[in-house]
Image: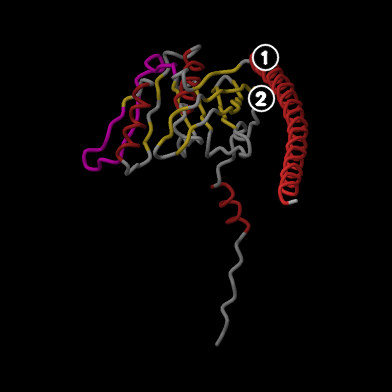
Amino acid sequence: MTDTPETPIAPAENAENAEQVPPAHPWAELAPERFRLLRLAPLAADKYTGPRPLRFVELAQVERHSPEESLLRLFIHQTGQKRSHKQNTLEVWADHENKTLRFGPESGLSIVPANRGLGRFLLAQAVLWAQKSWSHYLVEGGTLAENGHEEQRQLRDHFLQTQGFDVEYNLEHQFKGSYSAPRVSALRGDWNQDKVQIIELLDSASMLEQADQNLAKQEAHIAELQEQIAKYRREDGGLRFTIVCLIAFCLFQAGLLIWIATR
């Protein structure tokens, strides 16, 4: 049997393959620059995600502008979670040459924790940012990820329609949908502030001070209770000794009476 030698790739083919890979956008890996604190209000347990207690998460953002385009990238970060462009990230790109606005990332908006109002909050922040300068820009539509669960699909569609988007589905395939909007001015920049609240720096400092004061009061109250418990234990020990002495005296008296009676 004769082994067939491998054919080396020519330098020209290497160069051609390298040209096929599009260069990364200079804003692709920007680190967040501004940070804010978000309060997620406690909500009733959800049948899909379970308990929804009070939580605090970080809102981070980075913004860039050039004559050709502008970018706003929003991140949601929670304790113990690494930042990823595939999760808890929303991008808004404004194309100034074509006067259009598009939302990203291309993989779609994935939010954790889910069902806490964060998706609508991020989209509202993006809309408010865009409407400051480019309300007349056209909005680029996009396709929606297929979701076979009817209730979750309805929740997603309601969320988009609440923010001003139109949602349409393919007549031949009921799960293939798309979203669109005429212009940036048609979108809505509000969200459910009962679910998500922005905590400013001074407010967060005041909350920490209040929590520290409450902790000090609780520690003082606990120390007072511990002193009372120690006092009750000492009194209980004295009462136990007195009871033991009385029992011993009663037994002695009973024994003495029995001895007198038998004599």
Q: Position of residue 165 (x, y in %)?
A: 35, 24
Tell how many labels.
2
Give the residue type that dot 1 points to: Ser
Which secondary structure, mark 2? loop
Which label was assigned to residue 14?
none
Tell me if residue 154 is in the magenta stretch. Answer: no
Q: From the image, which quarter does the N terminus lie in? A: bottom right
The answer for how far apart the CA atoms under marks 1 and 2 are is 24 Å
Which residue lies at the image location 47% right of the left edge and 14% below the top edge?
Answer: 131
Crowdedness near tag 2: few (<14), some (14–19) or many (≥20) residues, C-alpha within 10 Å? few
Crowdedness near tag 1: few (<14), some (14–19) or many (≥20) residues, C-alpha within 10 Å? few
Which secondary structure, mark 1? helix
Residue 31: image quadrant is top right
The numbered mark, 1 or 2, whose residue comes first in the sequence reads 2
Write the start and end of the magenta stretch as one range.
Answer: 167-191
Q: Which residue is mark 2?
A: 33
Magenta span: predominant SS is loop
Q: Are marks 1 and 2 in contact (CB under 8 Å)?
A: no
- Eye-nearest disc, 1 or 2: 1
Whether residue 52 is situated above or below residue 194 in the rendered picture: below
Question: Viewer-proximal residue, 95 or 154?
Answer: 154
Give the residue type that dot 2 points to: Glu
Q: Position of residue 257 (x, y in %)?
A: 73, 44
Q: Which residue is mark 1?
A: 206
Whether residue 124 is situated above or below residue 21 in the rendered picture: above
Question: Viewer-proximal residue, 125 or 213?
Answer: 213
Tell me if residue 186 is in the magenta stretch. Answer: yes
